[in-house]
Image (cartoon, rainbow, N blue to C red):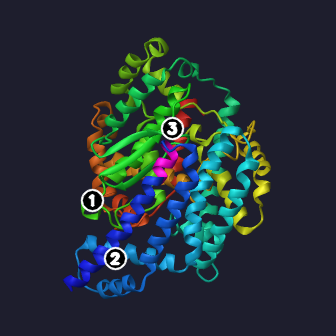
Amino acid sequence: MDRIWEELRKLLEQARALEEAGILFEWDNETLAPPEAVEYTARTMERLSEMYFALMTGDRLGELLEQCGDRERPEEERAWIRQAEKKRRELSMIPAEEYGAYAGLRARASALWARARKNKDYELFAPALEEILTFKKRFAACRAAKGQSLYDAMLEEFEEGFSTEKLDRFFGLLKRELVPLLNRIREKGTEIPWEFLKGGYSREGQEKLARFLAEYVGFDFSRGVMGESAHPFTTALHSRDVRFTTHYDDRVDHSLFSVIHECGHGIYEQGISPLLAQTAAGEGTSMGMHESQSRFYENMLGRSRAFWEPVYPRLRELFPAQLGDIGAEEFFRAVNRVEPGPIRIEADELTYSLHIMIRYELEKGLAAGEISVADLPGLWNEKYEEYLGVRPKNAAEGVLQDIHWSQGSIGYFPSYALGSAFAAQIYGHMEEELDMEGLLRAGKLDVIRDYLRDHIHRYGKMKGSREILLEMTGKEFDPEYYVKYLKNKFGRLYGV
């Protein structure tokens, strides 16, 4: 039996090595690679993906998984086997010749998206998006259970158990509860000054602030790095090599909160048990739970008054000309103001899920064939006018603002809204267990991080998101926590 396990372990380690090579190329592609490298990188990604596919769908791996799957093994090894079987099953449904071609397409499409966004030219990117959508539909058709829609199959990649039926109810609740709240805030007409967040914030100062905040919230730079990209993101080879990016512009809060957000992802990855490192179970359990951690850090912690009490003096030291005369309460109100705008990653906390709802509705239509790729810019702008009362000025401000579709992540966006709702439920539970405000005022974020690590992070994929929520909070997923959190916060802030 040990011989069989050792052979299986070696094959799975080879598969993971190929995955990690691909992750490194993707990181390089988005951060440091020169523009002329794209086509060569795409070919390398194709070859790596073909090798990974052949190994994972090979007969010998199947035989070994079958022999080991029904034996008693340590919990971590059983999780590794379970996740490897799941990946093998999903890959075996896809035509081999298409898998590598799709990996190459994604590498090319990301570069095309970046160029199209820079030039505000949707037509430059549209053909690549059409190809990606075609691949995703074919792959979803291969995986879909009997009677399951293509979009439901796509959603399963990112958050199992949340079908369009459940998401329609979830987003219906948000629309019923949040849009009237937004309208009451607009009608009241309270203006919260924020102009001091813009102008004169040096790149050097913002980089120092980014490093300080990352370390402050608990990101471990001995096991991670920070880079820069057009669209902030986090990736991980394993818990000992976690990487995130931010971006810098003339608004200090843009980079500031993208750093805290991405560190939420990074802290999750760094907290996964080392016994799961470099295995199929050594990742966050789902994108919804992953987003819960980034939104928890960014909003529940980072946009609270208590968080800034020990931190704000450091901001004033870095930017005395901009913030020297601005008090902590003024800063708190400014970074929490409600101001509907066209850009998702710059959205205020209240309107954020409306941005996600727009993408959900468009993705659902694309997958069903009710919306064409050519329709997207116009429909995007119409929905922004309907839900947020704003209209993007150009494609870069509109349909080209997100990198996700260029990477094939169709079905990912609902995870952001689910993650926000997961985070509210987690925070509500933690307030019952810990003195959250007291810990934030004392700068004891390590206590909060360790609690999250014990109840969420360390498990990797050993437990699903719904199982983690139930065990941690004692309740099934309940989006009412999210609605109550937003109503209480912005009701107090705006007196509505």
Q: Residue 138 appears at what percent x and percent y?
A: 65, 73
Observer-side mark, 2 or 3, equals 2
- Mark 2 and mark 1 in contact? Answer it, CB < 8 Å: no
Give the amino acid at mark 2.
Ile
Q: Earlier in the sequence, mark 2 or mark 3?
A: 2
Earlier-in-chain disc, 3 versus 1: 1
Q: Quadrant of residue 434?
A: top left
Q: Secondary structure at mark 3?
A: helix
What residue is drawn where x is 73% and y is 38%? 392
Disc 1 residue type (three-letter): Ser
Query: In x, y percent, where is residue 478?
Result: 49, 59
Spatial CA distance of label 2 from label 3 is 44 Å
Q: Which residue is mark 2?
A: 81
Quadrant containing the N terminus in the rendered view: bottom left
Residue farthest to the left, as pictured: 2
**Magenta range:** 26-31
Question: Does 443 appear above or below 63?
Answer: above
Mark 1, other Cα within 10 Å: few <14 / some 14–19 / many ≥20: some
Q: Which residue shows up at 61% across the image and 83% down it?
A: 146
